[in-house]
Amino acid sequence: MADEKVEMNQSSEQGKSDNNQSGMNDNQEKSANSATPEATEKKKVADQEKTEVKAKPSKEKPVKEKKPEIPVRRFTLSSSPHIRDTDSVQKIMSTVTITLLPAILGAAWIFGFRALMLIFLGMAGAIITEWVLQKLFGAKTTVADGSAMLTGLLLSFNLPAGVPWWIPVVGSVFAISIAKLPFGGLGYNPLNPALAGRAFLLASWPLHMTKDWLPAFWWKGSGYGYFAWKVEASKFLVDGQSYATPLEVSKSALTTIKSENVPELVAAAHQTLSTVGDLLFDLIKGNVGGCIGETSALLILIGAAYLLYKNYIDWRTPFSFIGVVAIGGWIFGGTSFFTGDMMFHIFAGGLILGAFYMATDMVTSPITPKGRLIFGAGCGLITLMIRMIGGYPEGVSYAILLMNLTVPLIDRWFVPKRFGHKTIKAQN
């Protein structure tokens, strides 16, 4: 009974709410019908505006075309040189050493196995000295770059073939320990190490450096052989033409002609001078006495030609060097002015070796084109002065060493103009 009462109450309440809702709807319809015509018109206008707004197309922003992306270039600022090459120090040094192989083989044939041993001792002394000193001072070892080996080789080339075995060793030790490493190693030495070592030997043991000459093919003489080591240079003093270098013979003959009043001595000097002048082809081939590596000009020129082709050396230094010596020898190298033998002064002595392999050293030579011309001409002038009026018959080594000291000034005085630079003269 109680449940039936509850259900009857819920149904009655639901009916009341439905009646109230329908009454409200009727009232709203009546109010809408009873609205004034003005209100109805405003409502229509508002509805129409809303419809127009909805119907209007939306103003979209135009799509911009994408421009192609420009790659960003990054520029790295650094000090010069800005143009780099693939050639390394090791490659350059090894190439220079290889170009000297013809001269090494020529020296081995002309002066025998003794010349090969002196070359080996010089190279070994330079390599061992550099390695030991760098290990002792905790520095980075640079033996692998080949510069020490080349120093020992060039030093040995500037020694007479009859010197004792310890001469190239001592010279190499001096070249590396005094003329190279104390200044910071390769790239910082102000003097050519090989020539500095030779100058040290010449000042310390002048008799060995000026009297231990051997004639070409001395090992073919009686009592000797190709592998002979012990030899006394004094045994070859019988014939002056064979034991002395052509430059020494020529200078002695010129001195006799200009200073002696004895007709017999002067006539003999003239005869000697004419004989020396006929040695041109022997000088080119190397069939003369002299230092180990400087006798055969032809073999040296073969290697030098390849260095010029590879641009490892600049033509300005050797050509100006040789040119000044040739012209000066023609003017002052004879019994009177303009009677000298130009070709003799070019191929005699160590001019070819020094001009192409020592004066062109990248470290101790100028870096500007004009500077290299001045440097070579200065070397030629000093060489000529020593040959003509100096105490030694040859002056290539001292000439290059003296000009090495002027390289900083030459580089400063002959700086090339900047690109686009133009000098404007002031008008009065």
Image (cartoon, grey):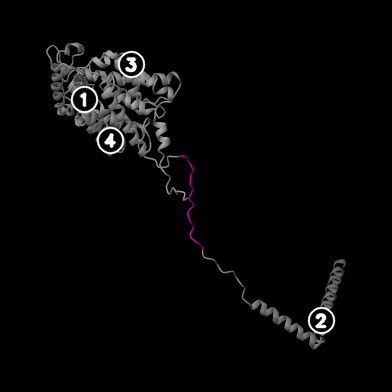
Magenta: main secondary structure equals: loop
| Residue under label 3 | 203
| Residue under label 2 | 28
| Residue under label 4 | 319
Tell us which disc is closer to us: 1 or 4. Answer: 4
Question: Which residue does the image show at 25% across and 36% down from the upper left?
Answer: 306
Three-letter residue code for mark 1: Thr
Relative to the observer, which residue lies in front, 195 or 5? Answer: 195
Question: Which residue does the image show at 66% across and 76% down from the upper left?
Answer: 54
Q: Earlier in the sequence, mark 2 or mark 4?
A: 2
> Alpha-carbon distance for marks 2 and 3?
134 Å
Instruction: Locate residue 250, reporting x and y percent.
Output: 19, 22
Which stretch appears magenta?
66-79
> Alpha-carbon distance for marks 2 and 1?
133 Å
Asked if residue 173 can be seen in this view, the reply is yes
Q: Element type at marker 2?
A: helix
Q: Do the residues bearing badges 2 and 3 touch, measured as CB atoms within 8 Å?
A: no
In this picture, residue 399 sits left or right of residue 416: left
Asked if 40 appears above or below 54 in the picture, the reply is below
Q: Do the residues bearing badges 2 and 4 touch, measured as CB atoms within 8 Å?
A: no
Tell us which disc is closer to us: 2 or 4. Answer: 4
Three-letter residue code for mark 2: Gln
Q: Earlier in the sequence, mark 1 or mark 4?
A: 1
Asked if 229 appears above or below 282 in the picture, the reply is above
Q: Element type at marker 3?
A: helix
Instruction: Locate residue 186, reporting x and y percent.
Output: 39, 28
Q: Residues within 10 Å of mark 2 (few under 14, many from 20)?
A: few
Question: Which residue does the image show at 37% across and 36% down from the upper left?
Answer: 371
Q: Earlier in the sequence, mark 2 or mark 3?
A: 2
